[in-house]
Amino acid sequence: MDVEDKLITNTGILQYENEIILQLYHEDGLLLLARGLGLERIFCEIMKLYCAEHNLVFILGCTDVEQTYFIEQLINDGIDPTPRIITADISIHDRKELYIQGGLFFVTARILTVDLLTDRIPIDLITGLLVYRAHRITDSSPESFIVRLYRHKNKTGFIKGFSDSALDFTRGYNQLECVMKNLFLRNVYLYPRFHVTIRSTFEHCSPDVIELQVSLTLLMTDIQVSLMELINACLQELRSSTAWIDNDILTVDQAILNSFERLIHLQLQPIWNQVSIRTKQLLNDIKTLRLFVLYLTQYDCVTFYNAVQAVFINEKLYGSRGKNIHSSQGSTGSWLYLPAAERLLMNNTNQQSTVTISAPPTVSSSTASAAQRAYAAYSNRTSIS
């Protein structure tokens, strides 16, 4: 039974998964799949095609948890033999015997490197390499060295890379090209969510999405406005303190995005040793304020109150230098002395003070006394704050 027949008889495979598996089986390449579209399922199906003992295939890049997961999935699907895990506990003689028997092997880069260099593995008889999490491959990674050794002595074996982290390929320069060069691959298979095959597959069973929105309270809205004003004040000071950052990036809309720090880092990295202390402090202040914007909706009011208070208390104890954000002398957290910071502190205190604890309508005497003690302790703590 050929590969096409096996996939047709497997009714659990989706249309786009079937297309990807056939492409990878017939032609080596790097699969770059959108996150959440089942890279594990595809990788498991690829493993099934090479589980026979007449193959000698090594799997790189899997964690211990992933190795256990894949083996359990293959056992549940009735695959025999299943991949074997090569660890340092297995003796050199036993490893050589296992390699001669053939099959699929989960192996660490360190063990495989040693076995390849000492000729414990017949490199010319290796069927191929499956590289999981291929986005982690770099010029200096051990997996890159293994692939180089393998391809130097074996020109016919396959190499297949798998990744569902497209974001990692956008970092640095020519990251995708570097990964493909290190894996000796010429083809890349891109499958984003808007791929024609993927869209047509999920259109037949589109889910019913129910979107629930919880509006901010008045105090939370005031706190959010204060945080935005503080971020804008830091950005204005940053524009006047440095000319090395593109002004299009220094906006409030950009500053609250997760990519803001990466964009700033790319522009300042070549001249980081020339950047003033004040500029670096402003970048740290923006990072802190951006975290507060996130904490406002992610944390409860008490946790958020403690986080903000910690910054104010730290400034009073250790950073009482200069109270004007436009002062020529840089100071730690000088945004804390702006009017927006005062409103932030006031609204934050008011929000935390609105928390009340109510006793249940009917409780036992022991439970009631415990609740009263807890309520008294909480009231004392709130009044002290």
Image (spheres, grey):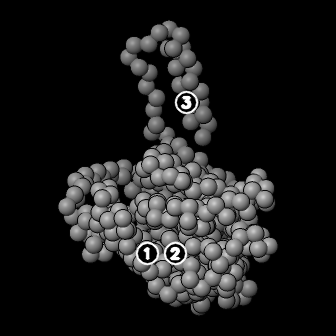
Residue visible at 55% across and 30% down? Answer: 379
| Amino acid type, callout 3 | Ser
Front residue of 359/263: it is: 263
Looking at the image, residue 69 lies above or below residue 285: above
Is label 2 in contact with label 3 (beta carbons under 8 Å)?
no
Q: Residues within 10 Å of mark 2 (few under 14, many from 20)?
A: many
Q: Distance between the residues labelled 2 and 1?
A: 7 Å
Residue 363 visible in image: yes
Q: Is residue 112 left or right of residue 341?
A: right
Residue under pointer 1: 24
The quarter of the picture where the C terminus appears is top right
Labels 2, 3: front one: 2
Tell me the tag on residue 4. Answer: none
Is label 2 in contact with label 1 (beta carbons under 8 Å)?
yes
Residue visible at 55% across and 46% down? Answer: 303
- Secondary structure beneath label 1: helix
Residue 91, percent from left and from top:
79, 56
Front residue of 134/343: it is: 134
Q: How crowded is mark 1: few (under 14 residues within 10 Å), some or many (20 or more)?
A: many
Of all residues, the one furthest to the left in this rendering is: 204
| Amino acid type, callout 1 | Leu
Residue under pointer 3: 379
